[in-house]
Image (cartoon, rainbow, N blue to C red):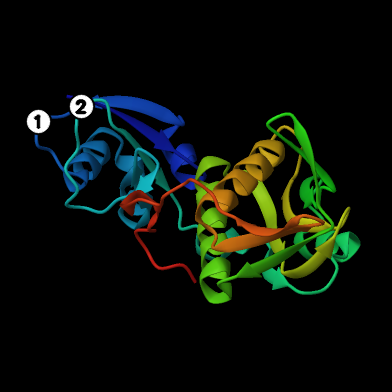
Amino acid sequence: MQITILFFATLKDRAGSNRLSLNLPEGSTLDDLRAALIAQVPALNEHLQAAVSAINQEFAFGSAVLHNGDEVAFFPPVSGGSGYPELFQIAADRLDLNALLAAITTPATGAVCFFSGAVRGETNAEGKPIQTTHLEYEAYEPMAVAKMRQIAAEIRVRYPLVQGIAMVQRVGVLSVGEPTVLIACASAHRDQGCFEAARYGIDRLKEIVPVWKKEVGQDGSHWVEGNYTPTPADVPSEPQP
C-alpha cells in the first residue's frame, strides 16, 4: 500500500523535502512507518522519534494501523504555540483590537489577519426581513476555552508558519453593530497562511466551541442553534494545555 508522508519544520530540513511516498506491506502501523523512514533517511532518526504524528489530519500514535492512500504528517510538538503568543478568552467587555494585536505580535510579525463577527440588525429569512434589537450570548466557558486551544493546535498543523493566534468570544447582551467574536492570526508575511488560518479558525469555532446566542427583536426572542454534531474526530488525541 502507498502512504504519503508530510514533513514540517526541523523534520523537513532533515528529510531534505516536505513530502515523499513510501510503499508498505498491508497492516503496517505508524511505528512500522517510522522505522522504514529512518532506514531510508537516517538523518531523521533523532527528530522522528520525538515527532508528533497525524494520520489524515488527526493525531495518531504508534500502534495505529495504516491504510492505502493515508496521509501521514510528522512535525515538532505544537503545544504552547511553539513559543508564539496565544490568547483565548470569553469576554464580557468590549473588545480592544489594538490590545489584542499587541498581544499576539512579535518583532518577527509582518502580517495579521483579523476576522470579527458583528450583530446584524436585519436578517432576511424566506424573503422577509427580521429586525433584531440585540443578541444575548452565553458560553460553557471552561470547555469553550479548551476548544479554542484545540483549534489553535489544529491551525498550527495545517498552517505551520502562523505565529500568534487570538480567539475571543463575547458573552452577555450585545447591541447591533457590536463585535461578537474575533479570530486573529499573525505570520511573518501575508502569504504564510494567516488569511486561511483565520478563516479556518472561525469556521471551526462555529462547529466545536460551545457558545449560543439568543436573537431578541420586536416580535420576541429565540435561541439560534447550529446543525453540526461533533464526532469522535473532534476529540483531540492529546490533552490541550
Q: Which mark is residue 68?
A: 2
Crowdedness near tag 1: few (<14), some (14–19) or many (≥20) residues, C-alpha within 10 Å: few
- Which quadrant would the N terminus be assigned to in this image? top left
User: What numbered label is drawn on residue 142?
Assistant: none
Q: Give the CA distance from mark 2 to mark 1.
A: 8 Å
Q: Is residue 86 above or below residue 41?
A: below
Q: Is residue 198 left or right of residue 69?
A: right
Of 3 and 134, the residue lying toward us = 134
The secondary element bearing badge 1 is classed as loop
Of the pair 122 and 181, the residue shown nearer to us: 122
Is 90 placed left or right of 229 in the picture?
right
Q: Position of residue 90 (x, y in %)?
A: 68, 70
Amino acid type of disc 1? Glu
Q: Nearer the viewer, residue 97 or 121?
A: 121
- What residue is drawn where x is 22% and y is 37%? 39
Q: Secondary structure at mark 2?
A: loop
Query: In this orientation, does residue 106 appear?
Result: no
Near mark 2 (Cα within 10 A), the count class, few <14, some 14-19 or many ≥20, is some
**Looking at this rendering, what residue extends furthest in the front direction?**
219
How many numbered circles does the render carry?
A: 2
Of the image marks 2 and 1, the number of the one nearer the N terminus: 1
Amino acid on which disc 2 is placed: Asn
Q: What x and y, as percent, mark residue 183?
A: 71, 52
Which residue is pictured at 72% across the width and 69% down the height?
171
Q: Which residue sits at x=59%, y=62%?
A: 211
Name the residue at 87% across, 55% down: 176
Q: Contact, CB < 8 Å: mark 2 with mark 1?
A: yes
> In this picture, is 112 found above or below 50?
above
Q: Quadrant of residue 15?
A: top left
Name the mark on residue 26: 1
Residue 159: % across, % down: 58, 41
Residue situated in front as seen by the camera: 104 or 131: 131
